[in-house]
Amino acid sequence: MAALALGLLATHLPASAAIWDSVPDEQLKALDLSRDASPKELFDSLSKRYRAELTKGKLAKYWEPIPMDMYLAPTLFYKPPAEPAIEAKREDCVGCHTAVTHGWVKSWEKSVHANLDQIRALPDSDARAYKKGVIVEVEDNLRSQGLLAQGQPLKDVQCTDCHMGVGVAGGNHAKDLRMPDRTVCGTCHVRQFAEAESERDTLVWPQKQWAQGHPSHTVDYIANVETATWAALQQREVAASCTMCHTNQTKCDNCHTRHEFSTVEARKPEACATCHNGVDHNEFEQFMYSKHGTVYQTLGASWDWNIRLADQFASKNGQTAPTCQTCHFEFKGQYTHNVVRKVRWGFLPFKNIADNLDDPWFKDRKEAWVGTCSQCHSPRFATNYLTMMDDGIKAGTNLVEDTRKVVQKLYDDQLLVGQKTNRPPLRAPEKDEPGGFSSLFFADRNQTTVVDRTFAEMWEQHVARYMKGLEHVNPGGWTYSHGWSDLIKDQAIINEQDTVLREKAALELRVNKLEGAKSGAKTSSFDNAPGGLLAGLTIDPLFAGGTLAMLGGGLLVGGWAGRRRRPGGDEHAER
């Protein structure tokens, strides 16, 4: 049985001193490494690239970090606390922190890090026995890097190993303390580090729908800081909310929380829920309301979560329905930390994705999904559902694109409320565009109109939720409760506003002609400019049509009264 436990690990590890087969060829090519490279060579190459590409981004001059950022991107911003300025020894940490932050200590004491010998002593019948092979792998990685002597076992993983350096005896608390990033975890867990980092190498869109590696965990921080709206926000505490989820690139504890780093936690859907929820990426809610989620919620307590993902479906006490992890970690029968090997639609359903689903790149990934689903369903069922899903997403994408044309034409014709008079420029680096992402976060005067806001919600939130409902098989997630009905509402509001604004413009043009004929001067009576008939008037979209009707009626009544007052006017003729 011991051989079997270590053999489970060997499915990821070919010959000794060779790179694991779970590390894709695309990554080795990008790093200019061969399969016979050592763990040290792989780690050094990964770390060098990681640090080179983790920056403040191309919009760095527009924003400055706040104190919280040192915890969200420690590689860039972390500074040790000035106090206590002591020389801390390896054995001192637990004693002090039991008194000041006992929660940390309690979590660590329950972790594998603190109990390596207990893991080594597990019987092979224990579901956790595979971790014995993981410990051996970690020891080999450390020996390859010169951090563990040949023949010396790893005793435990203490505070100083992560917060000062692997194997160090101690250091100055005010100078040497570090907040771990991905490379710190990757020092021991080279394979997992490489798998996760390979997302940037394997996600190469055939028609450049997204930049290479996007969207993925491994570039989520740089994607965040290079978003113009995020960089333009002056309220940095508001921007921090985005950053708190865009930190998989910067550290590893989003999925297995410090200081227990529990694989049981990381295997459950709730581990994903902190970030994968809400108005534009509600994967957790969609999953929980699906039949998959129903089985998880009703029967999941009876599953043995210590069983590793690769063995869950085959084990007697394993899962009987999929979770986020069993679907997204799997690729052609192998489970790794690269969770984008089957990505087809990305984070938003772009038209240039919908138009290219017949490309071999998309077809291959669809077939990989059929393989995943076929663990529980027939290939025919899986294929039929995925085809229905694609067709549904394309229908939603078409709604968005049809509406985009209406919004763009209003903008091009300068008919949005206040566009000529009361639409100040956005704070750099953001630039004005109709219904842009900025419409969700800025509203100085008419920077954001009802049309802008409605369309921003349509393309960034509602069609995303619609897509997620289809992808996660939640019937209420794409048609009625949310999804299609939301998109139709957005389209209806924008079409009505298009009619209202164009009728207003036509009426203004007629008034200008009448006024011009009377005075010989061109006026703008219905503009929102000072002195215009609409000066200071805010038109609610629901009442705009009625307002214009009343104004039009008022003009007719006023004209009739004027005719009656004119001496010798038509009033006498009509008597």
Image (cartoon, grey):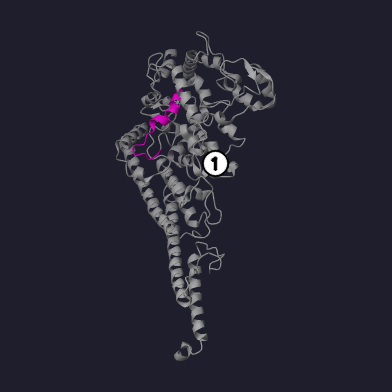
* Side (left or right) of 64 relative to 480: right
Q: Is residue 320 visible?
A: no
Which residues make up the magenta segment?
191-210
* Side (left or right) of 176 relative to 534: right
Spot occupied by residue 452 in the image (x, y as percentages of width and height): 48, 54
Spot occupied by residue 531 in the image (x, y as percentages of width and height): 55, 68
| Residue 130 to residue 410: above or below | above
Quadrant of the rendered image containing residue 517: bottom left
Q: Is residue 151 visible?
A: yes
Depth check: give the residue in front, 286 or 194.
Answer: 194
> In what element is the residue under mark 1?
helix
The residue type indicated by label 1 comes to: Tyr
Q: Mark 1 Cα within 10 Å, few/some/many (few <14, many 20+)?
A: some
| Residue under the point 54% across and 39% down | 61
Depth check: give the residue in front, 89 or 11.
Answer: 89
* Side (left or right) of 103 relative to 414: right
| Residue 511 to residue 394: above or below | below
Disc 1 target residue: 62
Inspect the magenta stretch and tell me whether residue 192 lies in it: yes
Inspect the magenta stretch and tell me whether residue 375 lies in it: no
Quadrant of the rendered image containing residue 573: bottom left
| Residue under the point 45% across and 28% down | 197
Spot occupied by residue 433 in the image (x, y as percentages of width and height): 46, 51
| Residue under the point 37% across and 18% down | 35
